[in-house]
Amino acid sequence: MKRLRIGVVGAGLIGRKHIATILASQDAELCGVADTLPADDPYVRSLPVPYFASHRELLSAAKPDAMVIATPNRLHVPMGIDCARAGVHMLVEKPIADTVALACELLREAKRANVRILVGHHRRYHAQAQEARRIVAGGRLGKLVAVTALWATRKPDPYFDTAWRRVAGGGPILINLIHEIDMLRYLGGELASVAGVTSHAMRGFDVEDTAAATFAYANGALGTILCTDAAVSPWTIEQGLGENPVFPYTGENGFRFLGTAGALEFPQLKVWSSRDPAKVGWDQPLASEPVKVVDRDVYAEQIRHLRAVVDGREAPVVSGEDGTRTLAATLAVHESARTRAPVDLARDYAAIDDASR
Ligand SMILES: NC(=O)c1ccc[n+]([C@@H]2O[C@H](COP(=O)([O-])OP(=O)(O)OC[C@H]3O[C@@H](n4cnc5c(N)ncnc54)[C@H](O)[C@@H]3O)[C@@H](O)[C@H]2O)c1
């Protein structure tokens, strides 16, 4: 079968990861890279494929089947629209856009052009995430009652030398919490409403360093999540899975899913239930069972999946519509913190449904 010809725009931190992944892939071939870096930059010179000064040049000269868009957030939508108009499928890094309205513009263009969008919530491809989804949806915990999640780490001080990380949009809500909210949706079901509070008391920058939210699932379950980049802790998915060498492995579980018949710790997958499954109650001794799965390279899996989606063999694990719903729920934490009122997500979801029809 023909490999998928992929271009990458944005050869920064995550773009280079995608480039290395595509170069090593059996499913895809890298047909070009675009960035604003000078052509004599050592990284650019090391590229074994044509280099372009803009994504438009890449689109017209290299004629990719699909594009990875790994540029700063504000460029995702205009670049994505150019790809759609050129009939090119895309993997857009998260967040799909800065706002739900902009994301909807991209969804509409993609629909019109009949091109597929994947959003780069790569954690959904972990074997642990897919198994956890099966455990929750398969009823092993009974009916889902509640979820509690924690993502907490202390970003090193030099991280904040970069100006955009100290102002609105550069904080842990849009950079980190969005991944956790995506995981809460992927594992627990659709969110119906969100209420949030934020604080910048630890660093005193304009941007938040800590956020907490309560949320209601459409299925009736409730949840809480706490996210901070100012506290030392072993509880991030990165540490729990060892997915990123920057975060030394702890194997700890930051997420807990609680059901009428049992509980699940995630990402290390420990299921708790009554020792005697016929008896449920606080007087019953509990037993825990580790669930063993073999993880994989999620970036490689994401590229394999992109090809399968483009070929029409698989439904998207994270479609543009799905990524926009995650964005809506994440922005709701900011909005609720500002207005001091919970946010009902129904209006955003209606706009997203309308843009994807
Ligand atoms: N999935 C993940 O875990 C993950 C991790 C990191 C970043 N991201 C997302 O990826 C995107 C990029 O983040 P990053 O950390 O790699 O940023 P970065 O600043 O390291 O890289 C961005 C790159 O885009 C290039 N660029 C800027 N304007 C351009 C233009 N007009 N045309 C072509 N190239 C242009 C820059 O020169 C730079 O090389 C962001 O949306 C971010 O949220 C996702």
Image (cartoon, rainbow, N blue to C red):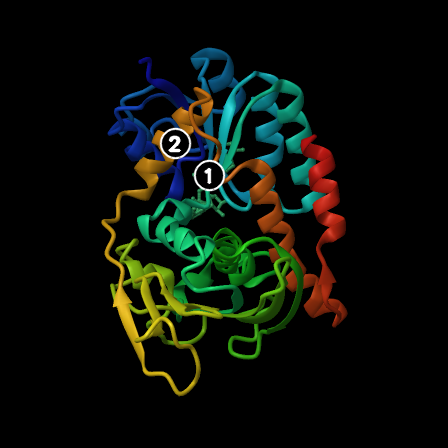
Amino acid type at mark 1: Val
Relative depth, front residue between 286 and 125: 286
Residue 42 screen position, x and y as percent: 29, 34
Q: Is residue 20 visible?
A: yes
Q: CA distance from mark 1 to mark 2?
A: 8 Å
Secondary structure under tag 2 reads: helix
Residue 260 screen position, x and y as percent: 49, 70
Which label sits on residue 317? 1
Task: Indicate the quadrant where residue 189 lies.
Answer: bottom right
Task: Indicate the quadrant where residue 77 lies.
Answer: top right
Q: Residue extending furthest bottom?
A: 283
Local packing at callout 1 (Cα closer than 10 Å; few below 14, some 14-19, many 20+) is: some
Above or below for 231 versus 3: below
Q: Which residue sits at x=29%, y=58%?
A: 241
Q: Which residue sits at x=52%, y=75%?
A: 203
Count of all numbered marks drawn on residues in the image: 2
Q: Is residue 34 visible?
A: no
Task: Indicate the quadrant where residue 255 lies.
Answer: bottom left
Which quarter of the image is occupied by the N terminus?
A: top left
Amino acid type at mark 2: His
Q: Are marks 1 and 2 in contact (CB under 8 Å)?
A: yes
Secondary structure under tag 1 reads: loop
Badge 1 or badge 2: first in the primary sequence? 2
Which label sits on residue 305? 2
Relative depth, front residue between 340 and 139: 139
Relative depth, front residue between 1 and 51: 1
